[in-house]
Structures are given as structure tokens and as C-alpha cells.
Image (cartoon, rainbow, N blue to C red):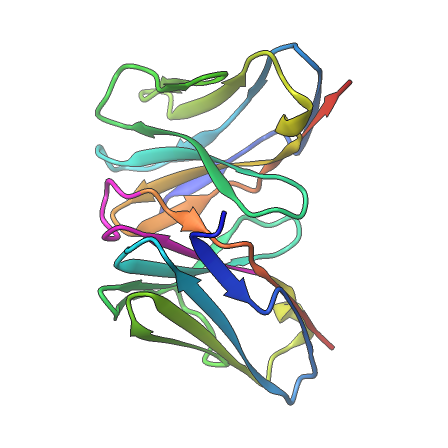
Amino acid sequence: ETGVTQTPRHLVMGMTNKKSLKCEQHLGHNAMYWYKQSAKKPLELMFVYNFKEQTENNSVPSRFSPECPNSSHLFLHLHTLQPEDSALYLCASSHEGGLTDTQYFGPGTRLTVL
Amino acid sequence: AQTVTQSQPEMSVQEAETVTLSCTYDTSENNYYLFWYKQPPSRQMILVIRQEAYKQQNATENRFSVNFQKAAKSFSLKISDSQLGDTAMYFCAFMKRIDMRFGAGTRLTVKP
């Protein structure tokens, strides 16, 4: 369970705050992902980075800004969020982001927007 | 777009018995992967089992097995000899290339 770590584990922020979520993987993978898990809704894929290049952006609002400085680290910068953005944000990684890959998930950051 | 449907929001099973979780999906693709993930309470999501669409043989991992019906686009998970530690949310997922789609999940409770 320590292959993919996420910090912080819990975050409470106001709508005018700026915060960042961090994900780190120790598996030697080249692809990393951000997911949003809301109550009673399927996981939503937000961003995909493959070899540090963003390859997918599923129409995520600009108040979410990802950053992937290297293949081991992934950030999600948050600003002027809305209460409906409260959710569990999961990071995942996989070897190459290809068809055969299995994704390994972090424990998530529980975000509450007041 | 690919969609994944889990029609059973909640299920329960007695310890040591067998339970089957349902999953159907919709796709026009021919080559893809299917997964079952488990998310225990307050713990991170872990892979239970995966199935390659081009393989006819159903995947098996110890007490976990799948019934993959490609024509029917059905991918159910069977858990044999259920244990208390199997209590969790179970998510069915479809992957084509880099895009992964999840079902809404089934909350499974194993009762002693």
C-alpha cells in the first residue's frame, strides 16, 4: 500500500483559498492519473500524464490545475473551488499508461470545500 | 463513450458463502481490459482481478473469479468462501488505452 502516497490525507479549504494536492509513486511507473470520487457517483478520470506529458483532460474546470514535474510526482493545484468540488481525490500510477497496464491507487485526499 | 453499470448498490453475504457481483458495460471496441477493484473502508483501492477481452478463459485469483461474457458485455465477480476482510466497495472498471471508466460500485458486507 505504500507504492503510491498522497498528501495531505484530509484538507478543508474555503472557496477563496489556494491549495495543492501531492502524489508520489515509488513503483518506477511512467503514467500518473488524477481521479475524483464523489459520493454515489462513479470515479471520474480527471487528468492523465504519460511520460510527464498530459495526454487526457476530461473537460475538467480550470480551477483544477495539474502539474507533473517528473514521472514520480504529480500535483493538483486548487483555486477558487466550489462546495460541489468536495470529494475524495485519488491518484494512481501505471507502468506506461498503455492498454495492458494495471493502475495502482493511492489512499486519496479527502477534500472539503466550505 | 464507454459506460460501466453496476446494478447492485449494496449486497451482503454470510461468511464462508459465495456471492456474485454484477457488472455490464457498453462499448464498440473489440480490444480492451476489464478490472475489479476493491476499496475497503478507509483504505485505498486495490486491484482484485483483471480480464483481457481477447482471452476467452475467465480470470481467477484464489477465491476471486470472473464470468466474462463478451457478447453480452457482462463481467461479474464471484467471491467464494467469503471472509470478513472482503467487506468493501467493489468497483468494476473498463479500460481502453489510457481511458479508464468505473462503475458506481457495489457495497459488499460480509456477515459473521
Residue A95 in sight:
yes
Instruction: Decide which of B104, B35 is in the foreground and name it.
Output: B35
Q: Position of residue A4 (x, y in %)?
A: 44, 56
Residue at 33% across, 42% down: A102
Residue B107 in sight:
no
User: In this rendering, is residue A90 above or below B92?
Assistant: below
Q: Position of residue B19 (x, y in %)?
A: 60, 16
Answer whether residue B2 is magenta in the image: no
Q: Residue furthest bottom?
A: A16
Q: Residue furthest right?
A: B112
Residue at 39% across, 59% down: A25
Instruction: Decide which of B24, A95 is in the foreground and name it.
Output: A95
Indicate left or right for B9 with B22 as reference. right
Indicate left or right for B1 with A5 as reference. left
Residue at 60% across, 80% down: A81
User: In this rendering, is residue B105 above or below B19?
Assistant: below
Indicate left or right for B83 with A4 as reference. right
Residue at 67% across, 48% down: B42
User: In this rendering, is residue B47 above or below A17?
Assistant: above
Q: Position of residue B6 (x, y in %)?
A: 55, 33
- The boundaries of the magenta stretch are A89-101
Q: Position of residue A76 (x, y in %)?
A: 46, 74
Residue B34 figure quarter: top left
User: In this rendering, is residue A58 above or below B76?
Assistant: below
Residue B18 figure quarter: top right
Quadrant of the frame with the C terminus of chain A: bottom right
Answer whether residue A100 is magenta in the image: yes
Count of labels shown?
A: 0
Instruction: Decide which of A110, A64 is in the foreground and name it.
Output: A110
